[in-house]
């Protein structure tokens, strides 16, 4: 599986199948009710303020966007004709609230992270992209890990927070012998 296919597959699973070519983002997402407005398969230099709430219910004061990062990929042979092709996946979540207290945004991101992990656990193949995802961790890590940064006030009552969900996703390509 190519890196692009893995990245696009993860982005579609969390972002939905509708691609906004102009904004370069998948939306609306299956997690829109939890506040996830869109997923980008690749990093962007900057999200616009409207990206955080685009496609969410009217009046949403908080929203989030996600970028897929493939941190590591180490293909190895595990048996004759079989290779192990694990990807270390990082889902970077950027949350935004206006106006809000930092505590409100923290509660929002906690609930969103629970929804993201729930979606991951609901289908460990991520819609058929991998053999398994989030089922086994890299050496010394848990199978699914979440990490949050500190919320930061950015003026005008706006608050932002970054979060990361990490897991290993396995793909086993077969090798044929001539």
Image: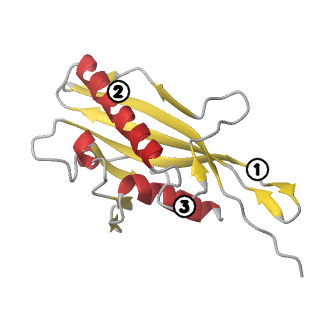
Q: Which of these two is toward me, 37 or 146? A: 146
Quadrant in the picture for the N terminus: bottom right
- Is residue 43 shown left or right of residue 47? right
User: In which quadrant is the C terminus drawn?
Assistant: bottom right
Depicted 78 relative to depicted 113: above or below: below
Disc 1, disc 3: CB below 8 Å?
no
Residue extending furthest toward the left? 59
Residue nearer the viewer, 125 or 99: 125
The reply to whether residue 85 is visible in this rendering is: yes
Residue 24 location, x and y as percent? 38, 62
| Disc marking residue 74 | 1
* Marks 1 and 3, how far apart at CA: 17 Å
Q: How crowded is mark 1: few (under 14 residues within 10 Å), some or many (20 or more)?
A: few
Q: State the residue position of label 3.
A: 129
Image position, residue 36 (x, y; %): 30, 44
**Sequence order check, earlier mark of 3 and 2:** 2
The residue at the point 81 percent across, 62 percent down is 82
Using the numbered discs, state the Cα–Cα distance from disc 3 to disc 2 in whole angstroms: 26 Å
Q: In which quarter of the image is residue 88?
A: top right
Mark earlier in primary sequence (2, 1): 1
Q: Which residue is drawn at 52% across and 62% down?
A: 128
């Amino acid at each position: 599986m190519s890196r692009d296919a893995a990245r696009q597959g993860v982005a579609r699973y969390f972002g939905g199948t509708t691609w906004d070519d102009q904004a370069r983002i998948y939306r609306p997402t299956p997690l829109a009710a939890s506040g996830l407005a869109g997923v980008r398969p690749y990093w962007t230099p900057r999200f616009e303020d409207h990206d955080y709430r685009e496609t969410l219910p009217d009046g949403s004061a908080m929203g989030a966007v996600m970028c897929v990062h493939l941190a590591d990929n180490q293909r190895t042979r595990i048996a004759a004709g079989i290779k192990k092709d694990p990807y270390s996946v990082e889902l970077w979540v950027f949350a935004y609230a206006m106006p809000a207290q930092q505590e409100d945004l923290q509660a929002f991101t906690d609930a969103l992270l629970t929804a993201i992990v729930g979606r991951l656990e609901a289908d460990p193949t991520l819609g058929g992209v991998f053999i398994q995802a989030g089922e086994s961790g890299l050496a010394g890590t848990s199978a699914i890990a979440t990490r949050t940064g500190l919320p930061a006030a950015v003026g005008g009552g706006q608050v932002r927070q970054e979060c990361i969900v990490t897991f290993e996703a396995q793909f086993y390509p077969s090798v044929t012998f001539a």
